[in-house]
Image (tube, rainbow, N blue to C red):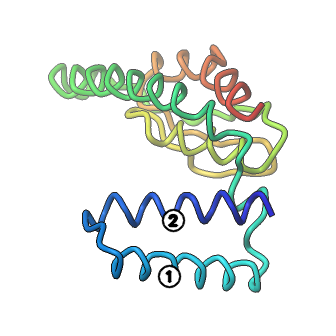
Amino acid sequence: MRHALALSLLLSCFWLVNSGHYTPLILSFMVASVFFVVVLSHAMDVVDGEAQPLHITFRLPVYVIWLAKEVFLANIAVAACVWRGPGSISPRTIRVRASQNTDVGVVIYANSITLTPGTVSIDLEGKDIVVHALTEAAEADLLTGEMDRRVCRVEG
């Protein structure tokens, strides 16, 4: 029930932000649309903790800010490699172990690796993530486990 209420709130906010119109007719369309989508989602049995992980809702913004900083710094490092030429890269494939307890946590970790320039998650086998790193520094940053720890904090 709480997931259905959270979905209703999320869809209503999304509608209000995107429509920009607050007349009674438009608001009644919103209520009808949100009700229809929530009932349909409930009938399809897709409104649950995995599809809508409420437990990470309030921890995620702090992580996203940290990840944005890391993406920015990694962009600078990759740009420096481009300027220095082919001798500045040392591509490698490594395997990292995810410490997260849920599938959502492991996927957040793997996607965060891919979002960071210089690293790409190639394969996910259980909790092992195969990663292609562009440089030794990118590998070292990943192997410190900082991103893994932060995703564990988000996961709760």
Residue, disc 2: 11
Query: Which of pointers 2 and 1 lies earlier in the amino acid sequence?
Result: 2
Task: Classify residue 124 as left or right of residue 99.
Answer: left
Helix or strand or loop: what does disc 1 sit on?
Answer: helix
Residue 132: give x, y in percent of width and height: 52, 39
Q: Residue at x 79, y 78 (%)?
A: 45
Q: In which quarter of the image is residue 154?
A: top right
Above or below residue 48? Residue 37 is below
Q: Nearer the viewer, residue 91 or 17?
A: 17
Pointer 2 and pointer 1: residues touching (CB < 8 Å)? yes
Residue 18: give x, y in percent of width and height: 30, 63
Residue, disc 1: 33
Q: Residues within 10 Å of mark 1 (few under 14, many from 20)?
A: some
The residue furthest front is 24
Q: Nearer the viewer, residue 42 or 109?
A: 42
Identified by mark 1, the residue type is Ser
Q: Quadrant of residue 93?
A: top right
Residue 88: give x, y in percent of width and height: 29, 20
Name the image quarter holding the C terminus. Answer: top right
Identified by mark 2, the residue type is Leu
Q: Residue at x 57, y 59 (%)?
A: 9
